[in-house]
Image (cartoon, grey):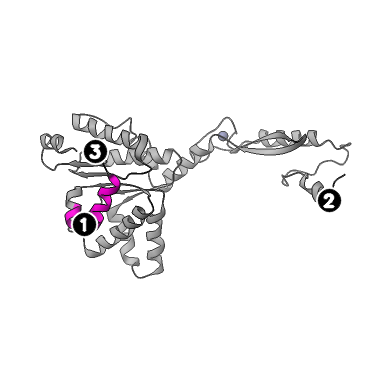
Amino acid sequence: MGTITEELKKAPLDLSRPERSSERKPFNRRDDIDQRVKWHNEDSAEPWNGVDCPLCKNRGTIAIRATIDRLDYYQLQVCSCMPRRNAHKYLVQAGLEGMILEHTMESFEIDFDWQGRMKQKATDYLNRHWKVNWFYAGGQPGSGKTKLCTAITMEIINRGNEGLYVIWRDLINRLKPTMNTDGYMKMIEKYQRVAVLYIDDFLESHGQPTDADVNIASEILKYRYMNSKTTIISSEWTLDAVLKLDEAIGSRIQELCGPFVLSVAKDDSKNIRRALR
Ligand SMILES: [Zn+2]
């Protein structure tokens, strides 16, 4: 017989179960644990976070009897479906749920050589560089920049990273009314701190960006630059144009993107092909 504390440690962990019948004597720890393992593993739930898992029947955990130093323990193991559930949750939080099937790397269509090179650059980025570098796709509307950047972002989130997708105009519209309030700091922190941020239509709101727009961009990107947080940006503005607008913002993007800058010229497809760096 151990001390009361030791005995308490061995007590059943799952308090939601019915009391054991007093007739079940003598008490056998191993049988008791096996019974609780069975109860847990027989339970099932409806699919959640977009996943229906036959392994854990949507409980998220699988119970086992583990033996350590010849003593048996009731243990719950996290099911292998959980990373997929988290990825789905992050995609929903990021507002990308509706795009899950349409915008994958596989579904990115290649009609021209330069699109193939765009895709190659994105694939390279995903394979080795996304934790260190940023990705910037600037230039002509309708060239597939948003599709490509969405696919990159979804791929990273699907690997279990928390991410956010935001359209610049929406971000500005949400932030500006809260300036000089506590709400502003809280909201801007969300975009500063999230592991992966994709800003679509960067600097495009209503005509030329105002000083306030530039300040907001600077606050978000400076923090992400200092803290090495993955950032993906698409815009009609080429990086050269951003550099002319605000050198500090442009040079931070340039430095962290390294080779992962796409510039699609605004003329015709001939120029687009030539201009793709
Ligand atoms: Zn599972």
Task: Verify whether residue 255 appears in magenta.
Answer: yes
Which of the two marks, 1 or 3, is nearer to us in this view?
A: 1
Q: Residue furthest bottom?
A: 180
Amino acid carrying label 3: it is: Gly
Q: Is residue 237 visible?
A: no
Element marked by disc 3: loop
Q: Which mark is residue 144?
A: 3
Element marked by disc 2: helix
Q: CA distance from mark 2 to mark 3?
A: 67 Å
Which of the two marks, 2 or 3, is nearer to us in this view?
A: 2
Q: Which residue carries the number 1 mark?
A: 247
Q: Which residue carries the number 2 mark?
A: 4
Which is more N-terminal, label 3 or label 2? 2
Q: Is residue 163 above or below residue 217?
A: above
Q: Main secondary structure of the magenta part?
A: helix
Which is more N-terminal, label 3 or label 1? 3
Number of residues whose C-alpha sits closer than 10 Å to that of mark 2, classed few (under 14), some (14–19) or many (20 or more): few
Q: Magenta stretch: give its range.
A: 242-257
The picture places residue 109, in percent across and down from the top left corner, at 26, 30
The answer to which of 118 and 255 lies nearer the viewer is 255
Q: CA distance from mark 1 to mark 3?
A: 27 Å
Q: Is residue 39 above or below residue 208?
A: above
Amino acid carrying label 2: it is: Ile
